Image (spheres, coloured by chain):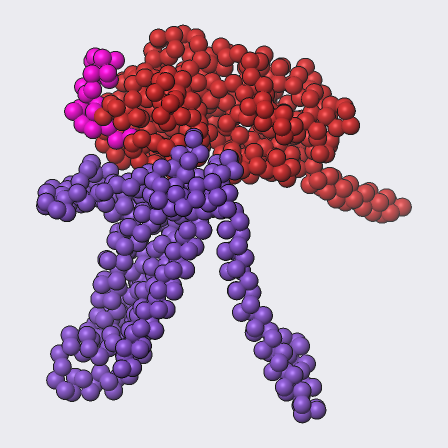
Amino acid sequence: MLNRLMTTALSAAVLAAIGFASVAQAADISGAGATFPYPIYSDWAKAYKKKTGTGLNYQAIGSGGGIKQIEAKTVTFGASDKPLGGDELSKNGLVQFPTVMGGIVPVVNIKGIKPGELVLDGKTLAEIYMGKITKWNDPAIAKLNKKAKLPDAAIAVVYRSDGSGTTFNYTTYLADVDPEWKDEVGVNTSVEWPVGVGAKGNQGVAANVEQTQNSIGYVEYAYALQNKMTYTDMINKAGKRVAPKSSAFAAAAENADWSSQPGFGVILANQPGAKTWPMTAATFILMHSDAESAANSAEALKFFDWAYAKGDKMALKLDYIPMPDKVVKEIEQEWREIKADGKPVYEAKM
Amino acid sequence: MSLAIEGNRHGRASGSGGIDADRIFHGVTFGAAAIVLAVLIGVFISLLVGAWPALRTFGLGFFVTESWNPVTEKFGALAPLYGTLVTSLIAMLIAVPVGLGIAIFLTETCPRPLRRPIGIAIELLAGIPSIIYGIWGLFVFAPFMQTVVQPAIISTLGAIPGIGFLFFGPPYGIGLLTSGLILAMMIVPFIASTAREVFLTVPSVLREAAFGMGMTRWEVNRSIIIPYVRSALVGGTMLALGRALGETMAVTFVIGNAHRIPSSILSPGTTISAAIANEFTEATAGIYTSSLIALGFVLFVITFAVLSAAQLMLRQMKKKAGE
């Protein structure tokens, strides 16, 4: 009798395990897109899987690829560093929301200059990248940095050669502060750079700047920190000098008017506020409002709901900035737009 | 496979099945060859279809325009085309003499105990993945170029009137010359090992007869050995050129990725494969993607042209040798 009970219990357990495994397998959330948020998405996914058993299959193939994949409906969500405009969103029936933010910082390699010692403003940065300011001891730079010892040396400009959301946000900022940049170069994930050399990825820009004397580049904040690079301070829209740090990026998010753009597609470049870092950027998720599979979309939203609630500490540890709570509330409101058979697929607990 | 065996067995029984087996064997091998052809034609067609929107929009201007502007969506292939050809030219100018030199040394004058170690070293060099060359190029070779080689070139060659315009500008470390040198390093082992193989096919009777007539080593190599294996040498060299034209990872690291046509070979530029590798993932606009595919199409055509030219040269040489 005991034996028989044991067998039944065992086989039930085995069956349950098989059933559970296959359910977990089927419910794996699939997404593809931007490389910038990949480290935090994979950290969140690991913790989430441990808690719920639901995994995330995220392919970091780049924002362009993410947009293409979600339009082709091969994934449950696409991820892009470049927010889509209202027209594009409605044309493809997409809902868009930001997940985390990061900062972009200028980095330099000048003998004797320490991190945070130099300060630049947007106009000067744009003119350096246009090839109008060619030497470090140019009056425009010297005026901002009266105490620093600037060399009489040519500026070696380094930019991202691969198309990237970082470049998109960086050029958005330059275009915002310098009308000439807007007219002659413009804004995109890659542009026709007037001067300089291109390097692949944040890592490539970091390596090129570290090796080239008198160079300047731009990288995501996390890379500047990890590589102990010489970042510069910036003069923000309010005319105040700010250092790149989490609180300055968060200030940009707090001061932004998120509801001004469809799909929260606010670009955080050059936001107002005395403590705001001018080159802050959010990364976005794209999902179909007419859900292909209600269960899959619900699982994805559940994951992001959990990430907003529990993932802040993990994000900060990787030098990302979590979304402010009031923005998260608006986002979860927006999620009601994701429907199947006329009903929202997921209701966030608010 | 089992069909062929079946045919054989049948053949033994009836006597006429041998022809069947042959026919099946022919069919199977023909199928294998046809797959290659089908793939080649498939690649050609899909490239052409993908490139069509760009070619239709920009017309022939695509091939002679330097500007590559993702913002205004105006694209031209001239800068990557130029970079591809110049870096491959630099690589061939260096790799052909060096590779041949290595092969001649190994087969003719190298002390016997050294032959194997040097031969193995060359084959190892050929086996290094290109990403390793790229990383090494960026972190080790480029700083060396920037601090030592390029300043020396700028102050010497750059000062010569007439050709000075080829060697001026700030020493970035990366650029067309650096890429050409890295490419040369990558294809030397190809040229050296194919050349060594073909030199070994020269009958020793020929060599001994030449020496017997009192020819020097230089004369034997120049007038007997190299002419004897010329066609195989050209073939090996063209394969190496094909690799140089299409090399992606290593070049992407050290070319500088600037869509410009610089007059100085020390300046940053770009190549077709580097441009595609850099920009394909984030190219969202239809015409942007199509222009990148059109670049791929151009590379396909160049490679095809190089191989055809090699065939033509071989035919000419054979004709000449026949006369």
Q: Main secondary structure of the magenta part?
A: loop
Asked where in the image residue B11 lies, by quadrant, the reply is bottom right
Horizontal relation, residue B193 to residue A245: left or right:
left
Does B32 lie within the magenta span?
no
In this rendered view, identify the residue nearer to me: A87 or B102: A87
Q: Is residue A168 above or below residue B83?
A: above
Q: Is residue A130 above or below residue A329?
A: below
Horizontal relation, residue A43 to residue B55: left or right:
right
- Give the residue at x 76% y 42%: A19
Query: Residue B311's spot in the image, x, y percent?
Result: 37, 69
Asked where in the image residue B212 lies, by quadrant, the reply is bottom left
Query: Residue A205's spot in the image, x, y percent?
Result: 35, 34
- Give the residue at x 29% y 22%: A127
- Give the residue at x 25% y 13%: A144
Horizontal relation, residue A193 to residue A93: left or right:
left
Does any portion of residue B287 appear in the rendered image?
Answer: yes
Query: Residue A88's spot in the image, x, y percent?
Result: 58, 27
Q: Is residue B86 above or below residue A123?
A: below
Query: Residue A325's spot in the image, x, y percent?
Result: 58, 14
Asked where in the image residue A194 lies, by quadrant, the reply is top left
In this rendered view, identify the residue nearer to me: A66 or B167: B167
Does any portion of residue A170 appear in the rendered image?
Answer: no
Which chain gets the red colouring? A
Which chain gets the purple colouring? B
The quadrant of the picture occupied by the C terminus of chain A is: top right
Q: Which segment did they paint magenta?
A: A135-157
